[in-house]
Amino acid sequence: MSFSISSSDPRRFVIAVLVFLALLFGLTVLARQVLVATGDFLPEEDIVRMQQSAGRPCIFSEYGKQNEGFYKFEIYKTVKPDIAVLGSSRVLELTQRQFSRPFVNLGRVMTDIKRGESAVTELLAIHKPKFLLVGLDQYWFNPNWDEAGVDKVKRVRSDPNDPRAILRLVSLVWREGLWAEAWQALTQGPECHLGISAKRFLSGYAADGYRYYGDLLTASEPHEDQNFRMTLGRIANGNRRFEKASTVSSSQFQHLLDLHRKLDADGVPHVFFFPPFAPTVTAAMEKDGGYGYIADLERTIRESGLPYVATTDPLLHDCDFIDGFHTGDAASVRQIRALAKQDARLVPFLNMPEVERLSAPGSSPMNYLTEDLGLPPKDYLDLGCAWARQ
């Protein structure tokens, strides 16, 4: 004979359920308050205000919330820059100190060329910069890329009542044992750094939208792309941005032409460029033979007459990279210096002493993490990089 609370006494069952739900609600409210206090669920306007007025590096982590678009637009609205860079995560290592005029990094605002015209339309409705750098990802123009998204830029506020975001952040506190940080935030209120991941790993966005990848130097887990095994695995499998194709998607390229026409019509000087892959990754794609669309893309964009600059970097090597297709500080600024050599319109916007300093041989991809936050160098890719031994 089976037995249960519900069958023996329905009232007790109902009371037990109500008590459980009340406890769950109370814990959720408490967790929400903690995450507001850590800075994770502060309104984006408050985050930007605190960062802009901090007078020192003040990192914001969007861990678990995916409100990057709204946050970056808020920076843009506050700064109203003379120059900005628009693109995916592959342009995130450009920062204000490399420029002589007010600058904002809009990396991850445009994660697909389809969103380009929408992003620019919304940005120009707020403010018109004097020059716009536009980083393009090669795989955006691959007809077989399976991550191509919608044609609307994503601008979503963080939702402090989103149970998934709360659970993810609370799990991070539990997993990393961040009880002291959570208690300090709850008793003292939000202060830099903002977000539990920023406090623990020193990872997140600077006041200008630049990205600190502090987790590469602070996390106990090994980097997922050590020796580029993750990226090379994608090439072998032909997936996750490394789908294979021989020619460019004409419909995707049309989105680029539309983006250019919009900027031209609004009188915004601009230049397009492709961030590089790590040399080992480039060699693997060439050996594979399945990436003919990249050469076709280079030919197509040259013949289109768009304001495009192809850059080469004789100093580029694997140790310049964060992973197989994201450049660090030094290589990113060397590419901007190469752009300026071919497009003189960019020169007045550059802080050349800083550009030349960071372009020197041996500069680190994690230069600002070491200088700004005091983190010691670490060969996170396990490549035997000389800069990690300095």
Image: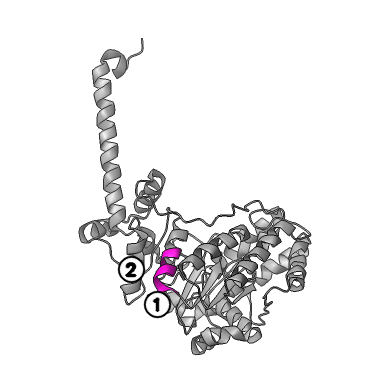
Q: Is residue 248 above or below residue 329?
A: above
- Residue 357 at x, y percent in the picture: 51, 87
User: Callout 1 environment at 10 Å: few (<14), some (14 to 19), or many (20+)?
Assistant: few
Query: Which circle marks residue 372 in the picture?
Result: 1
The secondary structure that most of the magenta stretch takes on is: helix
Q: Whole-Å distance between the Cαs marked 2 and 1?
A: 20 Å
SS at mark 2 in the image: helix
- Residue 158 at x, y percent in the picture: 39, 53
Residue 168 visible at all: yes
Tell whether 197 sits left or right of 145: left
Q: Is residue 179 above or below residue 361?
A: above
- The residue that appears at 29% across and 18% down in the rendered structure is 5
Tell whether 250 sits left or right of 353: right
Residue 109 visible at all: no
**What residue range appears in magenta?**
72-80
- Using the image as rendered, state which of residue 117 and residue 266 is in the foreground: 266
As drawn, the residue found furthest toward the front would be: 265
- The residue that appears at 52% across and 84% down in the rendered structure is 349
Query: Which circle marks residue 49 in the picture?
Result: 2
Image-quadrant location for residue 43: bottom left
Q: Amino acid at mark 1?
A: Asp
As drawn, the residue found furthest toward the bottom would be: 353
